[in-house]
Amino acid sequence: MNGPGTVRTIRAALQPHGLSLRGALLFDGDGPRLADGQTARALLLVGHVGSAHWQAFTRWRHRDPDAGHPDPLDRWSKAVIGPLAEANGATAFFPSDPPYQPFQQWAMRAEGLAASPLGILIHPLHGLWHGYRGAIAFAAVPADFEPTMPLGPSPCLDCAGKPCLNACPAGAILADGFQYHPCRSHLARTEGAVCLSEGCLARNACPVGADHRYEADQLRFHMAALKR
Ligand code: B12
Ligand code: SF4
Ligand code: SF4
């Protein structure tokens, strides 16, 4: 069951792992189905800004007896968020688990974020340098639950020159969205080594939230996953 300080407790428990609450939203019959068959009334998005979680994840990865197994970041997210949801009478959802839950739609609803030309949601302060690691959903709205307010218009709307559109050597970033196949073919060629080691050049070209740019090890980790 959730108690009077459920959201506060969850926020505090996430903090040592570099994770934070990245949005809170209410549903009116359109929430995901919970483990006990009920429909969610409230949901907390859990994620990271920049590299805030990277040290905690890296430490866990070095200690993990299963190190070397696929998808360590997903397994770490489950190890941190799963028990926290259970202890608070809630159901955890994870972005990479099929059937895919609409994490980006939830984030748009919670914080009013919009998609960038890369497909990634752009945050007015953190830019493209943030992600979601899970969600904690409740059948009843916790007493200290406050839905997040929209943050304001997308920085893409008045971005001079839109540098992300010209930075991709494979022409994979178009005004109407990210083209997976040219990107993937480029990453498989020798020329793709720069993206694999430095990170997506289009993402790097965005001036918004540049202080939150991922650290080198994190960039390489995500690019290796995209190449798979
Ligand atoms: C499948 C998937 C992909 C596929 C996209 C195929 C496709 N056309 O859908 C591929 C492998 C290409 C991909 C790539 C990347 N992805 Co992706 N992806 C997903 C995943 C697991 C499922 C998407 C989905 O079907 N959702 C179900 C539908 C019902 O939910 P939805 O909210 O309505 O879905 C939205 C997306 O589908 C979006 N969308 C449609 N096409 C594309 C294409 C791309 C590239 C993205 C990012 C989104 C996107 O439109 C919908 C919005 O209404 C989500 C996690 C999730 N559960 O949503 C991550 C997710 C969307 N991806 C994410 C990221 C960060 C990436 C990468 C940057 C990974 C990387 N290497 O760092 C790249 C982007 C490449 C680039 N150069 O920028 C993040 C986005 C975070 C954010 N700030 O918005 C998510 C939310 C995962 C996470 N843990 O945070 N991804
Ligand atoms: S470079 Fe401009 S258009 Fe591209 S993602 Fe960043 S803010 Fe949006
Ligand atoms: S990873 Fe490289 S090829 Fe793929 S979209 Fe980014 S810049 Fe283009």
Image: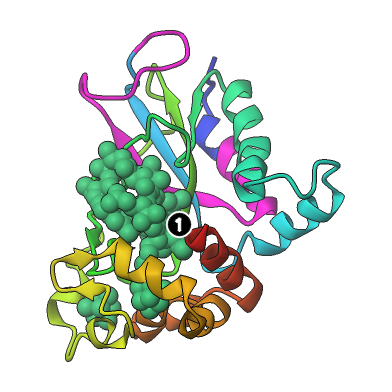
- Percent across and percent down for residue 71 are 62, 47
Q: Which residue is more in the foreground, 79 or 16?
A: 79
Helix, strand or loop for disc 1: strand
Quarter of the rendered structure image containing ligand 2 = bottom left
Residue matched to label 1:
131
Which region is colored magenta?
9-38
The answer to whether residue 10 is visible is yes
**Residue 228, position in %: x, y?**
52, 57
Residue 134 falls within the magenta-colored stretch:
no
Image quarter of the N terminus: top right
Q: Residue at x 23, y 82 (%)?
A: 165
Q: Quadrant of residue 210?
A: bottom left
Which amino acid type corresponds to the residue marked 1 in the rendered image? Gly
Image location (x, y in percent) of residue 57: 70, 55
Q: Is residue 17 magenta?
A: yes
How are the residues colored?
rainbow
The part of the image, by quadrant, that contains residue 109 is top left
User: Which quarter of the picture shows residue 200?
Assistant: bottom left
Is label 1 within 8 A of ligand 1 (CB to nearest ligand atom)?
yes
Which residue is at 79% across, 48% downward? 67
